[in-house]
Image (cartoon, rainbow, N blue to C red):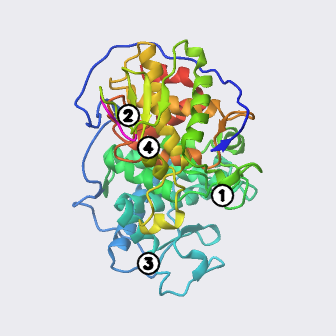
Amino acid sequence: MRRRLVAVAAAMSVLGASACSTEIQGEIRSEGTIAGLPITHFESGMKPSAPQPELTIENVSNTEDDRLAAAAIADVSAFWAEQFPQHFDQPFEPVGKLMSYDSNTDKIDVCGATTADVAMNAFYCPPEDLVAWDRGTLLPLLREKFGPMAVVTVLGHEFGHAVQYRLGPKAGVDQQTSTIVKEQQADCFTGAYFRWIAEERSQYFDVSTSEGLNQVLASLFFIRDSPGQSHAADGAHGTAFDRTYAFQLGFEADAAKCATIDQADVDARITERPFDPDDAGMGDITVNDQTLGLLQQSLDESFAGAGVPGPKIVNQGGSCPGGVSTPPASYCEDTNTVTVDMAALAELGQPIDREAEFTGQGSGGLGDFAAFAEVVSRYVQGIQVGLNVPVDNANAGLRTACLVGAWTAAIDHPGAALRPSPGDLDEAIAELMLPRSLISADVNGHPAVNGFARIEALRLGYFDGSGACSSKYP
């Protein structure tokens, strides 16, 4: 986050009331649906009954990752064979060439790229109509960290690029089309493909709408641009916030909607941008008493229009002696305070170590915004309690994540006590992907069921404001 010395009020609209219920503390809520589909819980991956793919793959091995890749390619090809006539009134021409390689041992010279260029990568090469993937490093890393559906995600994305070049003007893609537009379309096409799998139309894969989609979104988070990159840069893929938006758009709409993504659409909503000159510390500030004081100032001004006293943020251990505790930050209704465990928040607020993400040996820090957003989530519980809005019903966790998004957008203006920096929204997404996310939890610490619904709620508040939070999550 960026800190400023002068604050300007940013009033936000306030919620209306609805009915109340209670639940055992700690249980993850499973009410509702995910984009109109039932919430399901099972191990996602290849079906035991999956057929043997009939594909010609250059340099293919008998490894688990190549078997998974071959099934993914056969499956996404079947998806597009169905979708092209349905949405674009033309047949789908199969990709002309498929290639597997091991960047640790193979000498690669394809599409003008060398082994060094394609290590830890998967790509589509238009001149050769080629989809290729690194079975030596990339695929096993994704499978081990996020499960088999992460491999399917990457190859589904690369086929999305093949789709663009087959559609041409129907997707608005030509040699002048920016990288970010092509990447957003490919992520959206991937979302449409995964909807097809979730609807049980795939011969090869099953994906649950809870843990399975979490694997997919986690892999999109993992393969994101670093904070401070401009979306206008050649090679830009987007932030995790931008990538998950495009995937969810495809999952909730269809492939035809994905083909409408153009430069104007991207310019209007994309969040990837360079750091400002005054972004000291590459966008991360220390979480301490002073910066939580700035957070208090920001929240009080943002919610001044609510007409109720906002809770005070106090460094008193993160637990409520007389009520439910959700450390490292808890809303204590009897004292109207948000009590925090400063040491735990400061640890959470350590910058994300991008190199350590590949090894799993990082400090556990998710960035300053993840820590601040957890406190914000408890503060908005107090605002809602003051307005007699229930904070322990099925919608409360998603409404909370939505309000955190609305506050984030409302403070993004010159002169604010705190302003979001590039990468902050991705830090919030990292927290939302935690099994026990506090940003998406009700007052008792019950998180919403999965990352898909949580991220969607944050995004709704960010783009549409707090009024949308009460409408969507009454």
Q: Residue at x 38, y 13 (%)?
A: 18
Please state the horizontal and vertical placement of residue 419, each as a whole percent of the image: 66, 39
Establish if 367 lies above or below 443.
Answer: below
In this view, the mark in front (3 or 4): 4
Q: CA distance from mark 3 to mark 4?
A: 30 Å
Establish if 389 lies above or below 133.
Answer: above
Q: Is residue 88 left or right of residue 37?
A: right
**Few, some or many residues within 10 Å of mark 1 (<14, 14–19, 20+):** many
Q: Residue at x 61, y 49 (%)?
A: 285
Amino acid at pointer 2: Ala
Q: Is residue 115 left or right of residue 174?
A: left
Tag count? 4
Q: CA distance from mark 4 to mark 2?
A: 10 Å
Q: In the structure shown, which secondary structural element does the residue marked by tag 4 occupy?
A: helix
* Residue that carries the numbered disc 1 in the rendered image: 236
Looking at marks 3 and 4 on the same chain, the residue that comes earlier in the sequence is marked by 3
**Few, some or many residues within 10 Å of mark 2 (<14, 14–19, 20+):** many
* Residue that carries the numbered disc 3 in the rendered image: 136
Amino acid at pointer 1: Ala
* Residue that carries the numbered disc 2 in the rendered image: 441
**Residues at badges 3 and 1 in contact (C-beta under 8 Å)?**
no
Q: Which residues are magenta?
A: 324-328
Q: Quadrant of the N terminus?
A: top right
- Please tell me whether the stretch drawn in magenta is mainly helix, strand or loop: loop
Q: CA distance from mark 2 to mark 1?
A: 33 Å
Q: Residue 327 lies in magenta, yes or no?
A: yes
Marker disc for residue 432: 4
Looking at marks 3 and 1 on the same chain, the residue that comes earlier in the sequence is marked by 3
In this view, the mark in front (2 or 1): 2
Of residues 63 and 299, the one nearer the viewer is 299
Establish if 324 lies above or below 220.
Answer: above
